[in-house]
Amino acid sequence: MRKIWPKITRIYWDPDYNLPVIKPEPGQEDLFYVLKLTEPGDARPAFTVDYVRLKRAIEYEFLSDRLYRRFFMDYFLLLNKVPHWDQMWEIVSSGNVLGQLYYDPFSERWRFRLNYTGAYLAINEGLVDKVIVDKKIFRGQVLDISNSSSRQVVLVNENNNIKGIGETIGDKIIVTKVFKEKRMPIETSWKKSGLQDALKHNEYGILFYEEKAIRFLKKLYNKHPLPVVVSYSGGKDSLTALDLTIKALGDAQVLFNDTGIELLETIKNVEYVSKHYGLKLVKASAGNAFWKAVWIFGPPGKDYRWCCKVTKLVPIAITTRRQWPDGALNIVGQRAYESMDRARSPSIWRNRWVPHLLSASPIQEWNQLTVWLYIFHYNLPYNVLYEKGFERLGCYVCPSSTLAEFKEIEKHYPDEWNKWLEVLEYWRKKLEQPKEWIKYGLWRWHTPAVAKKRLIKHIPNYVLDWQKEYKLRLLSSKINLSPIKYHYEDNKLVVMFNKEVINDEVQQQFITNVLMLKKKIHRVKESGEIIIESAKTKVLINNNKVIVEPYDSPENLEDLADILKIIYRIYGCAKCGSCVLWCPQRIIKLTSHGPLPRKPCNACRICLEVCPISEVLVEKVVLPLITDDPGIWKRPTRRHGTEIIETFRFMGIISDSEV
């Protein structure tokens, strides 16, 4: 189903100068076309590496570069990212989207596919082969006709009307695209153009957005005269936000979070930019937290993001609370067109994980084209990784990365990539997965997600067994504790684990943690059984069994979840310090078996809910096994601790007027 973006951006095209326009001067809007882009339309300028990829892809498809030289070479191109199972861009040349440049993970190469507009222009000038079809076609259809030596052909009927695109394989053609929408090309001058032409043609727009952002920052600071800190990641958006902040406010501090899985160019860029502006650099650091925690959690996933809490949220919260205990104005490079969540975000907000900082983005309404034109106009020191073909910067093992991006990591940073491959290979073997699990990045999804299933279709004999994967993930981790079977009897749920659940070594730790939740607990010495009682539930732990009675309501499941979170936190504490950081009473200490209170607590549950073991491992691995539901973590009855921002209000760190 197509996503409906809350906000979309608009890019204009000047047909006379054959250049994009980010903001027409007043009264000139009717002189330009509005580009027809896939939402949200967040297009960016092409780098040299993009031209190279496009040229090679076209040569591969058509066995010639004639199409490239006619429509793309020496033109100012835009790339607009569109949904794809890996990475794909609409290619805009001379005001028209002429096709899609995409990465094919199965051939491990960049490819190009004409759209209707591109096919129309190409066959009119005789630049590509066409094949006549005499009947209706459908995607995936095999045609027993081929009089073309090129890999990609345009399919037309006897009247020369374009019907679709085909790929030649031997003496056959596979229909790869059937055109339903027939968009004719817009009229342009086809004048050659480059970056300097685009910068000169957008001087008004660059100045418009710059002045608006500076006014925003000045007004914000006048209302909230706090210390100013710019969160700088080494990326283009935070660089733009930093430059605007210095212009508007004159001074700031730079905050960088080193996750321990950053590329060297990013580290160098952060240090260089700080010196370039003469600003104090404050570093938060996760150290080796990721490389330690990966043996507890297993590889992270798009739907299994334990890594963000361990390497980002906790280090940033610790550092910012130490540096700016009385609050600060945090300028970030967030943009509405990056994601659905950011599209819904206001320009000023408080993050519940760092509520002592008032966050704001001066470029919330900027698109990528505006950002890059601003950077090029003022010759700002951007990260060289963009020139190497990286679309996004940050953790190089991020599961949100595409296979195309991982290919660039492998190419440019073999040592870093091999280090990650060693980890993936360990888990591949432990999870009893084929080599394709790494090759096609199937580890990037923890749950049996739709995108994962789409890739699996291309792997012969691959069987998706998420229950088996989950069990092996737990058994192969440092915790080595997994539910192996369960059954119902007499209104009870009986869960059997692979070993003794609570041994003598952790018994007292477990009891203390249960008491923190204000639950009744006692031990039956004769049988060695531990009994935990809440208002409507009794949980019994005896050797390798956990029994819940009764088990007939959502509350029983939530009581069981509480106990499991305590158990797994004891055995698998990652020592991230999240519980210590967020405890309102400041009474938690970390021990060899996880957190313990130094004195009686008020049972606010925050330490339990901010723990990545509880929030991620138990909710997304353990409970799904017990309930046979990989999406159980979405349940409406799930208990959550008090929102962090509410806790800070209670503690007096922020007032009601600041929220």
Image: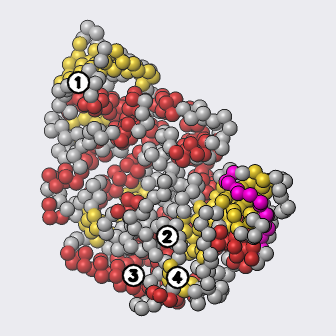
Lower position in the chain sequence, tag 2 or tag 1: 2
Which label's residue is closer to the chain start, 3 or 4? 4
Task: Describe residue 312's horizontal placement relative to residue 1 as left or right.
Answer: left
- Identify the magenta region: 127-140
- Return the mark for residue 33: 4
Residue 138 part of the magenta segment: yes
For badge 1, the amino acid type reads Thr
Q: How is the image coloured?
A: secondary structure
Q: Amino acid at mark 4?
A: Tyr
Task: Tell me whether circle 2 and circle 1 mark residues in contact (CB < 8 Å).
Answer: no
* Magenta: main secondary structure: loop
Marks 1 and 4, how far apart at CA: 66 Å
**In front: 301, or 508?**
301
- Residue 218 is at least partly visible in this image: yes
CA distance for labels 2 and 3? 18 Å
The tag on residue 41 is 2
Tell me, yes or no, whether the highlighted magenta stretch contains residue 460. no
